[in-house]
Amino acid sequence: MKIKRIIIFLLVALLILMTLAACSKSDPQVGEIIYLHPYECKVGDIVQFGPYEWRILEIRENNFLLITEDILTSRPFYSNPNGGVYTWEDCELRQWLNDEFLEMFSSEEIVKIIEARIINSNDPSGNDDTKDRVFLLSFDEVKEYFPNNTRRRARYSEFNNERYKWILRTPGLISGYLHCVDEDGKVGSSLTLGISGGGVRPALWLRLE
């Protein structure tokens, strides 16, 4: 009887360890974690989707809001801003994210990415809302999902894997400025990042059924 209890205890312990490991494998197969274990993941977990690792920011039933764990590239928001005004609706980075970047995913993965309504109406520029599969976080969203500077810090492999500035979709209060997160995780605005380029951390809503 004692041996039977020990065996049952060990089996239960093994099951718990397998569940905890489901969202934290060091080298998961593409899509494995988030496709096979969607209900075992929680906000803050790192998951694999497509060729990248993503952090879960929010879960609404079967819909997951993800942002890449690291900065993927450095690109300008605009190469030639219209009159010094940056708007997400018209920027070249939005076009790149929803075109070339999206092509890095398989057709099976793309159908799981939701074309979401992106709220821009609170921007200082009066930016119109958009519908996008891939987007950048806004000033308000980065404050909501990353409540302190430490959590906002991000690394960029092309910059010796050191911390690097990453840009948001919200224009600054001054014409020509763009909100960003600096190397220390502070949220501010910059005049040069819009044209010269800043770190890009794509975000998306993923539907799992």
Image (cartoon, helix red, strand yellow):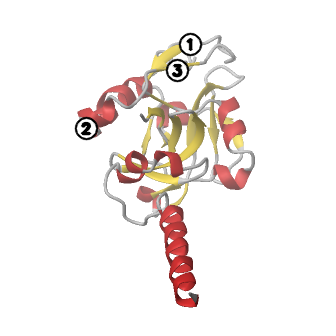
* Residue extending farthest right: 148
In contact (CB < 8 Å): disc 3 and disc 2 = no
Measured in 3D between alpha carbons, the distance from the residue under mark 3 to the one under mark 1, in whole angstroms, is 9 Å
Looking at marks 3 and 1 on the same chain, the residue that comes earlier in the sequence is marked by: 3
Looking at marks 3 and 2 on the same chain, the residue that comes earlier in the sequence is marked by: 3
Residue 184, by quadrant, is bottom right
Secondary structure found at label 3: loop
Mark carried by residue 106? 2
Measured in 3D between alpha carbons, the distance from the residue under mark 2 to the one under mark 1, in whole angstroms, is 27 Å
**Identity, as a three-letter code, of the amino acid under mark 2:** Ser
Which residue: 61% across, 23% down? 176
Secondary structure found at label 1: loop
Residue 50, percent across and down? 33, 45
Mark carried by residue 129? 1
Residue 198, percent across and down? 51, 41
Residue 77, percent across and down? 48, 29
Mark 2 or 1: the one toward you: 2
Mark 3 or 1: the one toward you: 1
In contact (CB < 8 Å): disc 3 and disc 1 = no
**Identity, as a three-letter code, of the amino acid under mark 3:** Trp
Secondary structure found at label 2: loop
Mark carried by residue 88? 3
**Identity, as a three-letter code, of the amino acid under mark 1:** Asp
Which residue: 51% across, 40% down? 66
Measured in 3D between alpha carbons, the distance from the residue under mark 3 to the one under mark 2, in whole angstroms, is 26 Å
Q: In the image shown, does 127 or 38 lie closer to the viewer?
A: 38
User: Does residue 101 appear left or right of residue 127 in this picture?
Assistant: left
